[in-house]
Structure formats: structure tokens, C-alpha cells
Amino acid sequence: MLVLGIETATPQTSVAIGSEQGVVASALVSRAALDGPQHKSGAIYNEWLMPAIRFCLEGAGIGFRNIGGVAVSLGPGLYTGMRVGVATAKALAQALSVPIVGMASLDLLAYEVRYSPRPICAVLDGRRKEVFHAFYRPSPGGIQRMTEYTVERAEQLANGIASKPGEVLLVGNGALLYREIFEELGSSVEIGTMGHAFPRAAALVELALPRLYREDFDSLDGLKPLYLRHSAKRIQWERIRESRSA
């Protein structure tokens, strides 16, 4: 089965096509490389995503009809990226009449370092001086999530790690962004490299395949981005509405 994976929840957007035999094509772009005054919010996703998918199909010498399933990263992450990625994945799954599965971006991040001898904390930059995170333990064949997906300030996460015994591997761009805070915890913390700063669509394909084979699909109606908080625009609108009703 060939699976199309779409990861747009983070500033490093990627797509991949692969099967149980490995990835046959992939494409990746950093949002920072294309951001600028000529790009409105979300333009990178709308302008890049479908051409990237077609590029991968052409590079692998296949067509949309060869895709047997669609997998998409649900976040937590960038609001616009999550919305565009999920909407595109749902539209493709419906048009191709194939199943769809959604997976958390933090799960993908932790899966990339599943061979770590230490417990894993996947940490993504949540902006507003906050991080999205979850803790995992390596398990046979993959990882097991130990906590809920959480958003809080980096200092709060550091305090939580300090209160627990043992060592931990922090991986993700959130860990790199707030490296100084986490390094104060000393040798109990190892910080991952830039090579594992963002989740990748290739990992999404690999994790989605077992779910697709056992028919653990998501419904098109029920599949939604993983929001851990309101967007800035929604918060602003709610404050305006509250002030008007006061």
C-alpha cells in the first residue's frame, strides 16, 4: 500500500509517499525560507503543498490512483498550517475514496528517537514563550506516550522535569529554542540536535501504515487539528466581545 503523508503543523513542512518497503519520494521546505512581505499568512502552505505532492508523485512515477491511504499530522503546531494540512488531506482522501488517519506531531517527533535509552520529551515551539510537549518511553517497536499533550511555558516544563528522578531526552525545536533554560537542569537532561527539530512526513507514513492495515481509520467528519489553546485572533475577538457586553 502506498501512503501519502502530509506534515504542515510546523515551520518545516514536508510531504512523503511510501509503503512498508520504505519512502519512494519526499519533499521538504522551511517556512522561514519563503516567508516575506509577498506571502500572506498561510500562503506557503497553499502555494507549496499541492505542487509538492504532484512533484513526489511524478518523481516516483505514479499517479493519484496509486495512493491507497492518506496520513496527516494534526498538530499541535501552527494554526494555519494545521488547518490547511488537514483540509487538504481530507479533500484528497474523499476525492480518491481512500482511508485517512491523523497523528499528533509530537508523536512523530518522539518516534524519530525511539531508540533512545532515556525517556523522551518531545517539545515544539508554541510561540508566546510557550511550548507544546508530551513525555514518552521507548517500547518494543516504537514509543508509548506517558502524558497528555500539554502547552505551558518552558520554565514550567523545566520545573516539572526537575521534580522527577532520572534522565530525559528533550527533542524538538522547542528544546533548542529554550536550550539555556533546560541546560540549567544539568546532566539529567540531554537535548537533541537540529536533525530532530521537526516532525517529518516520512515518519508519519511509517506510523500510519500499521493503522491502515488494521483498518483503524479516522472519519472525515471527526478528523480535526489538535488545538491546545485558542488562536490569538480568537482570543482577541473574545476580549472585544466581552468588552462590548460589559
Image (cartoon, helix red, strand yellow):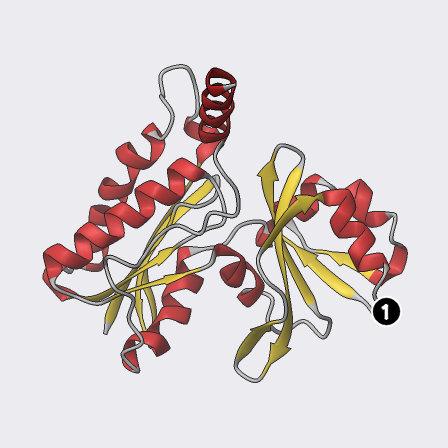
Please identify the quadrant where the N terminus is shown: bottom left
Amino acid type of the residue that numbered disc 1 sits on in the rendered structure? Pro
Which residue sits at x=39%, y=40%? 81
Q: Is residue 108 above or below residue 40?
A: below
Which residue sits at x=45%, y=55%? 200
Q: Quadrant of residue 174?
A: top right
Dot 1 corresponds to which residue? 165
Q: Is residue 60 left or right of residue 234?
A: left
Q: Is residue 184 above or below residue 149?
A: above
Q: Is residue 87 left or right of residue 154?
A: left
Percent of width and height locating residue 86:
31, 49
Query: Does any portion of residue 63 appear in the rendered image?
Result: no
Q: Nearer the viewer, residue 11 or 90?
A: 90
Q: Secondary structure at mark 1?
A: loop
Which residue sits at x=46%, y=47%? 227
Q: Nearer the viewer, residue 22 or 4?
A: 4
Query: Does any portion of residue 216 appear in the rendered image?
Result: yes
Q: Quadrant of residue 68?
A: bottom left
Q: Nearer the viewer, residue 75 or 173?
A: 75
Percent of width and height locating residue 55:
23, 47
Q: Is residue 41 left or right of residue 229?
A: left
